[in-house]
Amino acid sequence: MIPDLSKLDTATKLLFSIELQPLQGERFQPTGFPSLGAATYESNHGANLLVESAQSMANRLETVCWDDSADQPRAELAGLSYVRVERQGKYLTSSMTEAHRINSPYLLEGTDRTFFNQIKGELSVFESGPIDRKILAKVLLKYDVGTLLHGVFLAKKELAGGRLRIARALSAFIEAQGVRQAISGGVKNDHVNPSGSTKEGFGNVPFSREEFTAEKITLFVNLDLAQIRGYGLGKDIVHLLVLLALFKVRTLLDGDLRLRTACNLEVKDATIVATKPTGFALPSAADLAEGLAAAVKKTKDQMSITTVIFNDELKKAKDADDSKDETSEAADEDEAQP
């Protein structure tokens, strides 16, 4: 059954607070940052912890849309726009799986400049003057619908001087409240030579392990409906984007929430209802897939699936030739000096 989204017609945001719990036991491993470790902080509720960041959750919400076994989007998402990258006739990556989406170097820095020149031509209207959000959104919709939910920053100066960006309309993060450290450890045993050089990988190596317990773990989801309507792409595209966002959230929750080796979570309550607007229940994956199929059918003429050829070996050879040419030119100039 196609979901009824009429409760969202006048809402500016759709918010969920979804309680999670460890799949087994009470301990879990949060995300860690270089030179920082776990992101703990104090609030009115005591010691809290960032379990998963917004940027990491954006990547996870994209990943659940991809079928690794088939190297293409899930069957439920057939017809949605994205850019596929191939090397020597085989799948390499895509705008759905790249961290920077269509700003990925695998899309814009290859020797095949077809896609780059095409998107540059369509965005050339922004070389001077203000950015027309509607035109930008229309181009992004054509090549990668996911950018209208997860945001994008086209940082290359050749593209309107690096001024083209869209903020995230769909964001999510996981926090834990009332956390306590659970310190443990272990040792990598070398039964052949326990006193061997650890620098070379031999010997016994003790290590510590930092995990946490929490009174409450919550996944927060924020869908900015006002931003989506602000693209000016019409009701059918708004409907498509909202369905796609809900499908991503539902698929993530129904799937394997194993964020790391020691961070395997599950939804505590099967019924998921929004905190704003109150009373809106997250539809089932089957209903969302049915709604998406109907929405794609209405809007497919505004989207395309683009294939880009990336060959880094050819690029390296070209860079080497360019460097050789520059050296030769420099030598010629030296010879021409009196």
Image (spheres, grey):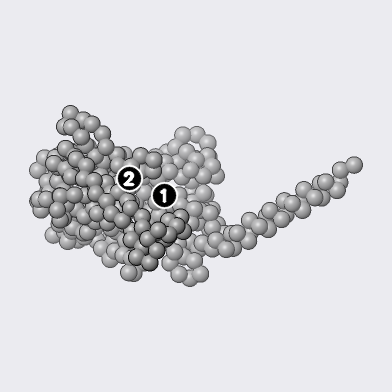
Q: Residue at x 48, y 49 (%)?
A: 122
Left or right: residue 284 versus residue 49 is left
Q: Residue under label 2, please give it.
A: 32
Q: Give the x, y percent position of residue 243.
A: 23, 52
Q: Give the x, y percent position of residue 211.
A: 24, 47
Left or right: residue 88 versus residue 321 is left
Tag count in the figure? Answer: 2
Q: Give the x, y percent position of residue 24.
A: 15, 56
Q: What's the mark number on residue 56?
A: none
219 vs 301, nearest the viewer: 219
Q: Which residue is drawn at 63% across and 61% down?
A: 317
Helix, strand or loop for disc 1: loop
Q: Which residue is drawn at 26% across and 41% down?
A: 50
248 vs 193, nearest the viewer: 193
Up the image or down, 65 lies above or below 8; here it is below
Up the image or down, 13 lies above or below 79; here it is above
Quadrant location of the C terminus in the rendered image: top right
Up the image or down, 38 lies above or below 68; here it is above
Please, what is the three-letter code of the amino acid marked with disc 1? His
Are there few (<14), some (14-19), or many (20+) residues within 10 Å of tag 1?
Answer: some
Q: Residue at x 44, y 37 (%)?
A: 131
For the residues labelled 1 and 2, the Cα–Cα distance comes to 21 Å
Helix, strand or loop for disc 2: strand
Quadrant location of the N terminus in the rendered image: bottom left
Q: Give the x, y percent position of residue 145.
A: 35, 52
Residue that lies at the very extreme toward the right in this rendered image: 338
Q: Residue under label 1, please give it.
A: 100
Please, what is the three-letter code of the amino acid marked with disc 2? Gly
* Camera sees residue 94: no
Left or right: residue 96 versus residue 279 is right
